[in-house]
Image (spheres, rainbow, N blue to C red):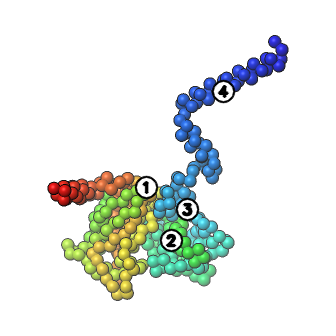
Amino acid sequence: MKTPTRLGLYGLGLVAIFAVAGLAASALVPHSAVQRWADGANDDGHGQGHEGNDEHGAHDGETASGLSIAQDGHRLADLSTPDRAGESGELSFTVVGPGGDAVTDFDLEHEKELHLIVVRADGKHFRHVHPERDDEGVWSIPWEWDAAGSHRVFADFVPGETGEGLTLSTTVQVAGDFQPQSPDEVVAETSVNGYDVTVTGELVAGSSSLLTMTITRDGEAVTALEPYLGAFGHLVALRDGDLAYLHVHPHADEPLPGETSGPEIVFEATAPTEGRYLLFLDFLIEGEVHTAELVLDATSEIGSSDGHPEEHEDEQQHDEEKDDHDHG
């Protein structure tokens, strides 16, 4: 057989082999999967499309953030703290802007230029404080660690240049004996300094949820809540495990000077994923700030949590009975 003829037959053989392989692949791998692979090849180069988690830890545009030391050209720099638990000193840092200089222009947010949130990795030893800034852009506050372990330090602020809120964070390893105390159950009721605090409402992943905090003392409603940071209470929510930071907003108008309220404070929160969330409520009475610590689980739908699903069932049954009565 002549060489050109042999090459021609060889080429036809390869075509046949690839055709059979293609048919086999089509039988084993759905077209939709192939399309997803193709779409993934056209993303930002990290093998993830635009529908997954973004670089700030939020899902589909939701509100978990605070897991990065840098965002939108801003970053935390020069963080300094005492090394060991029980050692007195100073916590200091700067916020560096896109141009590489320390930021000195901040908008007020909840009556402060910057909110500093510090909590240990297991959700214990929570602190919400407000350091002072010097003319060079260095933030500082007297500091002493209560306990050893890995702590996350959050800086929540609004740069004046952009007017857009940012939450940056980093971790600090504090030397000393460490005994982790991760939350192992939901805590919908707690007490702090003689005040009893209860949370009602459900966190539903991906949806805006209303949470109502009710404050009582000796069984009586507390109606002497004073304005604190532009509201009658300030709530911080962190996802257990990675301490992703949720922005929570009071569901009411800003209080007037001298106005008091209670016993309820309503907040609006969005949990980006299912899972356990740590809630820290700050409220002010007679000039003293109290912090109540609560724990809720976010679920995929209303009524599926371990909180009070029976309430939703009762409401649904009541609605059905009312419907039957109306149509009777």
Does residue 120 appear to the left or right of 170 in the view shown? left
> Could you say which disc has been placed on residue 273 in the image?
1
* Amino acid beneath label 3: Ser
Image quadrant assignment for residue 218: bottom left
The residue positioned 81% from the left and 12% from the top of the image is: 1
The residue positioned 80% from the left and 17% from the top of the image is: 5
Q: Mark 2 — residue?
A: 156
Judge by depth and name the residue closer to the eye, 9 or 275: 9
Q: Secondary structure at mark 2?
A: strand
Does residue 157 appear to the left or right of 5 in the view shown? left
> Could you say which disc has been placed on residue 44 in the image?
none
Say which of marks 1 and 2 sits in front: 1
Q: Secondary structure at mark 4?
A: helix
Does residue 244 appear to the left or right of 2 in the view shown? left
Q: Mark 3 — residue?
A: 68
Say which of marks 4 and 1 sits in front: 4
Decide: few, some or many residues near mark 2? Use Cα within 10 Å; few <14, some 14-19, many ≥20: many
- How many discs mark residues in the rendered view? 4
Residue 96 visible, this orientation:
yes
Give me the C-alpha separation between circle 1 and circle 2. 21 Å
| Contact, mark 3 vs mark 1 (Cβ under 8 Å) | no
Decide: few, some or many residues near mark 3? Use Cα within 10 Å; few <14, some 14-19, many ≥20: some
Q: Mark 4 — residue?
A: 18
| x, y percent for residue 51 | 53, 53
Residue 141 visible, this orientation:
no
